[in-house]
Image: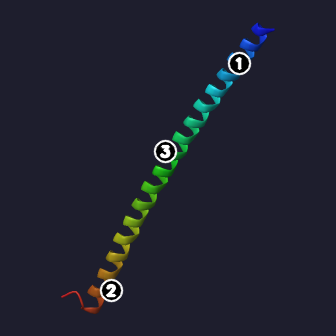
């Protein structure tokens, strides 16, 4: 009986360790995905800002305000 109890404790410990490892891996992946999304949004923001500045310059040039 004690042998079965030790085996159960071992298997429970193994399962817990595997679950923790999987959870850690999932958290790492989620963190990487969030960082990637953040970088993509920052890049998109910079592109929009540059296009808006270009558009403003075109308007200024067209109206003679850029001289």
Residue 37, given in percent of the width and then of the height, sits at 49, 54
- Label 1 neighbourhood size at 10 Å, few (<14), some (14-19), many (20+)? few
Nearest to the eye among marks 2 and 3: give it.
3
Residue 42, given in percent of the width and then of the height, sits at 41, 61
In the rendered image, the quadrant that contains the N terminus is top right
Image quadrant in which you'd find residue 65: bottom left
Residue that numbered label 1 is attached to: 9
**First along the sequence among labels 1 and 2:** 1
Q: Are marks 1 and 2 in contact (CB under 8 Å)?
A: no
State the SS at label 1: helix
- Label 3 neighbourhood size at 10 Å, few (<14), some (14-19), many (20+)? few
User: Which residue is found at the position 33% from the left and 86% from the top?
Assistant: 59
Image quadrant in which you'd find residue 55: bottom left
Instruction: Describe residue 18's horizontal placement relative to residue 50 as left or right.
Output: right
Nearest to the eye among marks 1 and 2: give it.
1
Q: Nearer the viewer, residue 54 or 31?
A: 31
User: Seen from this angle, which residue lies furthest front?
Assistant: 2
Q: Is residue 40 above or below residue 30?
A: below
Residue 56, given in percent of the width and then of the height, sits at 33, 82
Nearest to the eye among marks 1 and 3: give it.
1
Distance Cα–Cα, label 2 vs label 3? 41 Å
Q: Nearer the viewer, residue 8 or 44?
A: 8
Residue that numbered label 2 is attached to: 59
Mark linked to residue 32: 3
State the SS at label 2: helix
Instruction: Describe residue 29's horizontal placement relative to residue 52 as left or right.
Output: right
Residue 18, given in percent of the width and then of the height, sits at 63, 26
Distance Cα–Cα, label 1 vs label 2? 74 Å
User: Seen from this angle, which residue lies furthest right?
Assistant: 1
Instruction: Describe residue 48's horizontal placement relative to residue 30 as left or right.
Output: left
Distance Cα–Cα, label 1 vs label 3? 34 Å
**First along the sequence among labels 1 and 3:** 1
């Amino acid at each position: 009986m004690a042998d079965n109890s030790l085996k159960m404790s071992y298997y429970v410990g193994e399962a817990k360790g595997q679950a923790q490892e999987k959870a850690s891996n999932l958290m790492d992946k989620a963190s990487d995905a969030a960082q990637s999304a953040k970088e993509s949004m920052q890049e998109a923001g910079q592109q929009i800002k540059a296009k808006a500045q270009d558009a403003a310059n075109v308007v200024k040039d067209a109206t003679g305000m850029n001289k």
